[in-house]
Amino acid sequence: MAKEKEKYHWDWGTQTFPTIDPHSKIKHTIINEYIQTYIDVLMRNQLMPELGLSIVDGFSGGGIYNTEASEEKHFGSPIISLDAIQESEVRNNLDRKKQRPILSQHHFVDVKRENIGCLHSVLASRGHADRIGKDIYLHRGEFVQALPGITQNLKNFGRGERALFLLDQYGYSEVPFPTIKSIFRNLKNAEVLLTFNVDFLLAYLADQPANRKAIANIGLEKHVPWEQIKHLKAFEQNGWKSIIQKGLSQGIKEETGAQFMTVFFIRPLGSNSMNYWFIHLANNYRANDVMKSIHWKYGNNFTHYLSPASFYGYDANKDINITGQPDLLLSCDEHSFDQATDSRINGELSELLPREIYNIEQQPFMKLMTGLTNFTMANEQRVKKSLDDVIANGDLVATDKDGKTKRRKGSSIKPTDILLAPPQRSMFFLPSFPNKTKPGQ
């Protein structure tokens, strides 16, 4: 990744800044919207007197970019997070007599002195000079080495230990997954947004000592079928990446210890660009559902590399705002991320979920969702919608927690509701049994 790293060079003195790529703008948009939505959800509790939130940007860069289309500058994730919190505080205090502050702490880490110097100047130019060293901290060094001190600082800050880690690494090796596990182990309400260049990893994957060591260093060695790689590449030319990626995705969730994971792939502009994963890791179901809703908003494509209904993302080559051309041709492995996709997922879930309920007679809706969320691209809203017809037809019953009120459609289901198999089950959903009758009888 040397050439990629050289591309990102900042110098405030000479006003030298890298040019932002279209796919990176989408990533920044997701970060901005997630922070603001995260705050809105927490501050729905009108009795909350204040909100504490920490942002840790492990690969902050210089904080500013050039844009190809104009002379306007594009601010990086450090400024995006600061602005998002400020905007959220204003919005959540509109028409309130008693103001509720958002007490935030920011840690920005970068290995290059000139990048940190540029970020310092950008922060000052945005009116944050007096906050540096008070609630904005600049760390020059490797993220992994800086993490223990930052973690202790976050614990001292308290306020629920709410912390969002933005780990936009260049490749795949700078944030070992045991490091992420330590974040979840030491901070009660941490979340992680991780960039993982999966195509770069796959491009050089081979059963060789050096390659094994590189994968072992990030904690994923046991999740790669090393002995099968050569065979898979030779005889599964259209599917070997799918097999490897499934193992990697399952390994990431296991090795980080996160309860919930969402994978959003990002494909840069160009036919030979490396795809990467934008991974959200959390131990809070609602955080996972919020992120999925945002991904649906900005996604424009999905593939079957992980599973038919769970791998979705953004392809700059399919963004008409960038290319100026609508996507007219679809490969056999990819589908347009549009209403047809939504309908297909709705159809799959409307068949799957009643069967799941029938197998155990009844289940709280939230238990269904927490068990389902890592295996589908559908957020809570879409899962409810998929139950509209089966509830209306009586193939599934949904009641309030006391069993007194029946829901007429899935969209009306509340988080505390109970899902039940009806006394008279549709033949379509009954389990099938093998025919034990011998031939001729």
Image (tube, rainbow, N blue to C red):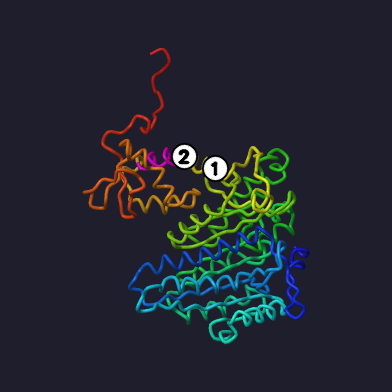
**Residue 356 versus residue 327: which sits nearer the camera?**
327
Query: Is there CB contact under 8 Å for labels 1 and 2?
Result: yes
Residue at the image point whose x is 67% and y is 81% from the top = 121
Residue 349 within the segment the image draws in magenta: yes
Query: Is the stretch drawn in magenta largely helix, strand or loop?
Result: helix
Q: Residues within 10 Å of mark 1 (few under 14, many from 20)?
A: some
- Name the N-terminal-most of marks 1 and 2: 1
Q: Name the residue beneath numbered marker 1.
A: 308
Q: Is residue 362 above or below residue 67?
A: above
Q: Which residues are magenta?
A: 347-357
Residue at the image point whose x is 30% and y is 37% from the top = 394
Residue 198 x %, y %: 66, 55
Residue at the image point whose x is 60% and y is 67% from the top = 167
Q: Residues within 10 Å of mark 2 (few under 14, many from 20)?
A: few
Toward the top, the furthest residue is: 440
**Residue 126 versus residue 81: which sits nearer the camera?**
126
Q: Residue 284's quadrant in the figure? A: bottom left
Q: Is residue 316 above or below residue 257?
A: above
Q: Is residue 125 above or below residue 27?
A: below
Residue 348, label in figure: 2
Q: The C terminus lies in which quarter of the figure? A: top left
Residue 223 within the segment the image draws in magenta: no
Q: Is residue 194 above or below residue 116?
A: above
